[in-house]
Image: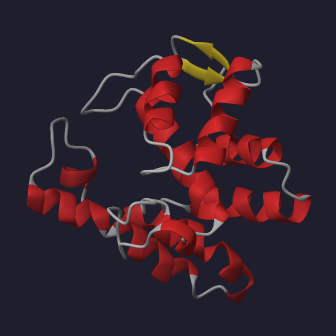
Amino acid sequence: MPRLLVSQYSVILAKELGLPEDEVEKILISATLHDVGKIGVEDRVLKKPGVLTNEEFEIMKRHTVMGFEIVRQVKRLEEMLPGIRWHHEALNGKGYPDGMKGDELPLMVRIIAVADTFDAMTTHRPYQSAMEPGGAVDYILSFANKKFDADVALALKSIFQNGLLKMSRAGALA
């Protein structure tokens, strides 16, 4: 079975938080498109097997704005733009690209940020091995009210504990 995608984690989180179906749909679309800007990032950076240099990280960080610029040209996707541009922002203002913080971040962004982080931590990448899902949940919880929204972090814990995410060594499964 394939692992879940950021968009699927985002939908599960949105439903756990009790969001209405129209909001869940917007989150699904935004989360599906959240990394579209990576098409503008050179493979030497995107697929680098080790830690990125400061210069390479600055290049990688541009994917949020590049994705925003691509998608904003489609009027029907206007409501999905926040999740594309700001999914690497943090409640404490130490994220990117705009250094937004706290209540400036829409719930859509807060959900996609947790889903994207969980996915990144539980998936094998060229630069890191996958972490056990429980460890990823604990990490996210440890940054609740700092980097991540506490309600979204607790929703992740709940869906993990309630078996809505069935885990295997290959990653999260439906």
Q: Position of residue 111 (x, y in %)?
A: 62, 52
Q: How is the image coloured?
A: secondary structure
Q: Which of 27 and 36 lies nearest the eye of the viewer?
A: 27
Q: Residue at x 37, y 76 (%)?
A: 98
Residue 124 relative to residue 52: left or right: right
Does 173 appear above or below 109? Answer: above
Work out whether residue 41 can be spotted.
no
Q: Which of 2 and 100 lies nearest the eye of the viewer?
A: 100
Q: Position of residue 28 (x, y in %)?
A: 72, 56
Residue reaching furthest to the right: 21
Residue 1 relative to residue 95: left or right: right
Residue 38 relative to residue 111: left or right: left
Choose top left, top right, bottom left or bottom right for residue 29: bottom right
- Screen quadrant of the C terminus: top right
Choose top left, top right, bottom left or bottom right for residue 172: top right
Q: Position of residue 171 (x, y in %)?
A: 54, 21
Q: Residue at x 15, y 48 (%)?
A: 52
- Screen quadrant of the N terminus: top right
Q: Residue at x 28, y 51 (%)?
A: 46
Residue reaching furthest to the front: 145
Q: Residue at x 57, y 70 (%)?
A: 103
Residue 60 relative to residue 136: left or right: left
Work out whether residue 16 can be spotted.
yes
The number of numbered badges drawn on the structure is 0
Does 14 appear above or below 3? Answer: below
Q: Position of residue 170 (x, y in %)?
A: 52, 16
Q: Which of 86 and 44 lies nearest the eye of the viewer?
A: 86
